[in-house]
Amino acid sequence: MSEELTKEQQEAMDKAFERSMPEGLRKVQNEYSNVKKVIGIISGKGGVGKSLITSLLAVKANKMGLKTAVLDADITGPSIPKSFGVHQKAYGSDIGIVPVNTRDGIKLMSINLLVDNEEDPVIWRGPVIAGAVQQFWTDVAWGDVDVMFVDMPPGTGDVPLTVFQSLPVDGIIVVTSPQELVEMIVSKALKMATVMNIPVLGLVENMSYFKCPDCGKEHEIFGASTVVDVAAKNNIEHTARIPISPDIAKLVDEGKIEDVDVDWVDDIYANLIK
């Protein structure tokens, strides 16, 4: 990374993370689970479309023949089930909690699949939320899964730290938007990943532009794209630019994300497979 931490800063951050959780926090997956790869989707702030990117990558992996799952770790802002049009509830069995399948066979687990009313808020403190995320790993019988995408809440708080320390995360995708302020916030998330020794597999800039349906011209509504510059500063090779698309937004609102067929995340996906 271009903004390298000093040795003293690195040691201080390492010690802070060591104090935050006890040793041996890595959790064992449910005995009826065989999850081969875990990919975290993170962002430095909310509202940049992290859940959209999670869903698009899961749909892409599933269409390419991989057994795919999504663990919705955004406990207080779960949106994954709605994107897939899933409203039925998960249920418990002798082998653990059984995830819900989407129309095309993607396995989902989210707090909205467990509560009576999916519109009720989850008013929990950080440690309780972190514990719920761990249970989504230890208590859910995922079965055979080639790749699991974990949709994390924004920022560098309890849940991202819990996921990094509790789950065998193989890499992360960072989601951002073009605003200059976001670049600073993204740097915090990238530095957290560095401290935790989690590879950054790609940087996705959502709402990067709007393509006029009449003339085909691309308009950068939120300012000039910064994804290439941010990636270069942080030695990230693979990037993607996602346009503002009313058609995609409509499909997501209707729970039809599996009907989306775009090539925006192909380079990111190819790097994941590699």
Image: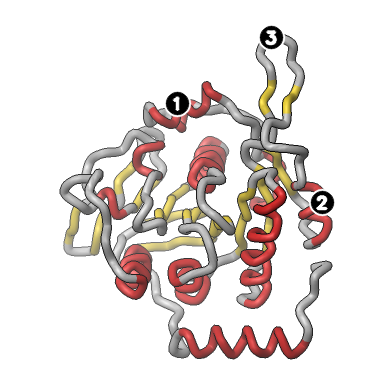
Q: Residue at x 54, y 68 (%)?
A: 156
Q: CA distance from mark 2 to mark 3?
A: 30 Å
Pick the front one: 83 or 170: 83
Residue at image location 67% in from the left, 36% down from the top? 222
Position of 22 with respect to 264 (left or right) is left
Is the Cβ of the residue at disc 2 closer than 8 Å to that at disc 3? no
Determine the residue positioned at 77% across, 54% down: 230
Q: Is residue 55 left or right of residue 72?
A: right
Residue located beneath label 1 in the image:
251
Q: Secondary structure at mark 1?
A: helix
The three-letter code of the residue at mark 1 reads Leu
Name the residue type under label 2: Asp
Task: State the residue position of label 2.
Answer: 229
Report how far apart the C-alphas of labels 2 and 1 lie in the structure. 31 Å
Q: Would residue 156 be visible to someone looking at this image?
A: yes
Callout 3: SS: loop
Tell me whether the residue at label 3 lies in contact with that at label 1, contact meaning CB atoms closer than 8 angstroms: no
Label disc, if present, on residue 44 of the rendered structure: none
Q: Label 3: which residue? A: 214
Residue 8 sits above or below residue 243 on the image: below
Q: Amino acid at mark 3?
A: Asp
Quadrant (top left, top right, bottom left, bottom right) of the N terminus:
bottom right
Which is closer to the viewer, label 2 or label 1?
2
Q: Is residue 237 above or below residue 249?
A: below
The 10 Å Cα crowd at callout 1, few under 14, some 14 to 19, many 20 or more, is: some
